Amino acid sequence: MTKEKLLLKITEKWPVKILSVAAALVIAIFYRMNTLETRYITVPLIVETNENLLPVSSFADTVRVGLRGEAATINLIPEEDIEAYINLNNYKNEGTFRIPVQIRKNGSALAVDPLEITVYPMEMRIILEQKESRDIPIFPVFEGTIARGFAMTNQLILPTHVIAEGPRSSLESQYEFSTETIDIDGRYEDFSVLVSIINNNPLIKIHGNRMIEYRASIRAIPREIIIYPVFEIEPYDEKEDENGDEPE
């Protein structure tokens, strides 16, 4: 067969042949899609912050992720190989923003094909504020009473202040930190304890290990010398007159 005849044979009815190939591809794709399965997992939401802004609004700390693919492969993906995160690096000013939730594949998830990933919610509404830091004083909290006859004569906190970091509005309303309760009930001698700093604001971060040392000196109170008054009592005189007058 000559080249000319071969070319005519190939191109003969080519629109029909192209349509047949396309239809076969579509059928193959639909068949493959119908054989795929979806697995749902819940993963932590990672917040990638920048140097100047911090989120102040509350939002979900986990998201729901759908993994669509062949059952034999998607069921082998560990949850830790799928990361969900929001990136704040592109935001420069305070305000309210809708920030998309992004997905990052790691480990075994990189080799899975086909793999379609969906995430819910797709975005988070977040309020961003300027990040600030400052020194905040610490005050001890006590329970109980020193032993009777004793008194606390001196006390020391190490350190007296901590560096706290957080959104502007949170730090503006944080005037001090308190310690966990220190039990002084019945104490009659010097003591030293390590106690934690209580921080009830999850938006504020305390630098360091969040522990302080509390020292106290206790001394006995000297007894006061009590002086009782002395009264002179005159003896009874039987010679008083009938009117009760004393004799001259």
Image: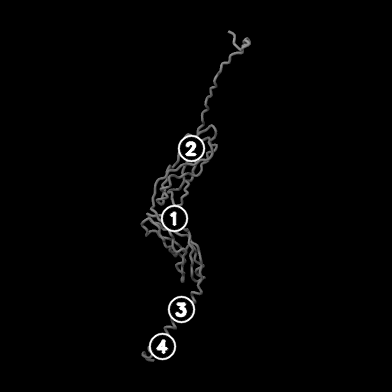
Q: Which residue is mark 3?
A: 26
**Disc on res. 57:** 1
x, y percent for residue 203: 44, 52
Give the label, 1 or 3, closer to the camera. 1
Q: Earlier in the sequence, mark 1 or mark 3?
A: 3
Quarter location, residue 239: top right
Give the label, 1 or 4, closer to the camera. 1
x, y percent for residue 97: 40, 59
Q: Which residue is mark 4?
A: 13
Q: Is residue 96 above or below residue 14?
A: above
Q: Please name the amino acid that badge 3 sits on.
A: Val
Give the label, 2 or 4, closer to the camera. 4
Q: Residues within 10 Å of mark 3 (few under 14, many from 20)?
A: few
Label 3's element? helix
Q: Please name the amino acid that badge 4 sits on.
A: Lys
Label 1's element? loop
How far separated are the C-alphas under marks 2 and 3? 82 Å
Q: Please name the amino acid that badge 1 sits on.
A: Ser
Label 2's element? strand
Label 4's element? loop
